[in-house]
Every structure is written in C-alpha cells, then in structure tokens.
Amino acid sequence: AQSVSQHNHHVILSEAASLELGCNYSYGGTVNLFWYVQYPGQHLQLLLKYFSGDPLVKGIKGFEAEFIKSKFSFNLRKPSVQWSDTAEYFCAVRTSNTGKLIFGQGTTLQVKP
Amino acid sequence: NAGVTQTPKFQVLKTGQSMTLQCAQDMNHEYMSWYRQDPGMGLRLIHYSVGAGITDQGEVPNGYNVSRSTTEDFPLRLLSAAPSQTSVYFCASRIAAQGEYEQYFGPGTRLTVT
C-alpha cells in the first residue's frame, strides 16, 4: 500500500532562516504530489502540486518543491521564512491506479519573530 | 460557488450515540472523500466515492458508513460513537478520481465523544 513519510515532526526557525521539509513516499508507479498548509484554526490550503513536467515546482507565498523520482522524494523549500508561515504542513501523494490522496503525518513549523 | 460545506462545525456525543456528519459541494465534482485528522497522524482517509452510487473504503473505515445518493452530498455516519472517534473530520471533493485535478477541502467538523 502507498504511504507517505514526513521526517520532521516539529521545526522551529527564526525569521529569515531557510526552510526544507522532507517528504518521501512509497509507490512505484506514477504519482501526483502535493503540499498543503493548515494555518491555526483553518482548513487545508494547497501550497503547490506536481503532476508532470519540470520537477521543480513553485507554489504560493514563495514556496517551492522538487520532485526527485529516484529518491521517491518531494521536499518543500522556502529561502526565507516569515512569522506568518507558522502552520502545519502536509505532504500528500495520489497514485494513478486508485486516485486516493494519502497524507503524511504533518510537520508543525513554528517561526520565531 | 460555496465550495465544500460541512455541518455541524462542532459536535459532542456520548459513547454509543449515532450521528451523521453532512458534506455538500456545489461544483459538480464526481469524487468526494472523508478524512479524519488526529495530532501526529496527519489526515487519514476514511471513505471515498468516485461518483453517485459508488463508495469504497479508505485507510480507517471501521465504525463509519457512507452513501452517495446524489453528486452533491456525501454524508458520513457514525452508528455507535466511541471515544476513539474524537477527531476533526474533513470532507473533500475534486472533479474526478483520475486526472490532474486539485482537491478542495471543507472547513471541518470537530467531534468529541465522551
């Protein structure tokens, strides 16, 4: 069965620091990849998505992610975080065979002003 | 469009009670799904539907029933609530099961079972 693993459960950064959140998945076939963000008290919002083409995708609010097929990874990056980026971040994978969207455990990001 | 709507926003149940969480979307999406969100476990898929009259189980289906009689609605039923079902429940929809489509989430229902 497909699974998604996010290595960092809780990350604390100071403003202007760079961010990289890891995401690995287990599935050998074609995948669609997503990062969602959940700000405190709100529901999930899509940050970025990868379906095909350029493996480096850019999303909203300065976030980007790189799909490395050989490593089954889709890490999220941001060069300089802001206090307003404090939120929970979820990686999700959808496989071509089932269409089910499976989430990782989530990473809580706390940015100190 | 209202998008994906969920009712109620909050609910407290006693063990053994039953209830239905409502989910509706007005985007004519074929695919709908239910997730539960628990601390440290991310979102886990409970049930999903690829169209009216078709439902299937996700990762954690036990204790929950669903039906899909119309394209718009996808209610989630708890037949006999248990404290382990205390969670935040999210409904989601997208145009179709396959294809490069974004999934939209509702605002969630926070359920507490005592």
Image: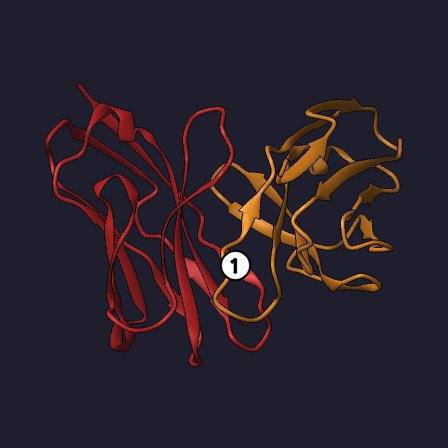
Chain colours: A red, B orange
Residue occupying the far top of the picture: A113
Which residue is outermost to the bottom? A29
Is any atom of residue B114 visible in this view?
A: no
- Horizontally, residue B103 falls left or right of residue A30, namely right
Q: Position of residue B1 (x, y in %)?
A: 62, 39
Q: Is residue A16 left or right of residue A11?
A: left
Q: Quadrant of residue A5?
A: bottom left
Please report the residue visible at 57 percent of the width from the left and 43 percent of the height from the top: B105
Whether residue B96 is visible to the viewer of this picture, yes or no, is yes
Classify residue B7 as left or right of residue A105: right
Residue farthest along the front direction in this orientation: B1
Q: Is residue A7 above or below residue B2?
A: below
Closer to the camera, B8 or B85?
B8
When the figure is inspected, residue B21 is found, relative to residue A94, above or below; the finding is above
Q: Percent from the top left, x then y, of residue A51? A: 38, 68
Residue B100, position in %: x, y? 47, 66
Q: Residue B4, percent across and down?
A: 64, 40
Secondary structure under the numbered disc 1 in the rendered image: strand
Q: Residue at x 20, y 22 (%)?
A: A112
Q: Residue beneath label 1, please? A: A102
The residue under the point 52% across, 59% down is A102
In this rendered view, identify the residue nearer to me: A86 or B86: A86
* Mark 1 surroundings within 10 Å by alpha-carbon count, few (fewer than 14), some (14 through 19), many (20 or more): many
User: In which quadrant of the rendered image does the C terminus of chain B lie?
Assistant: top right
Q: Residue at x 50, y 45 (%)?
A: B41
- Label 1 is placed on what type of residue? Ile
Q: Chain of mark 1?
A: A
When asked about the image quadrant of residue A79, the answer is top left
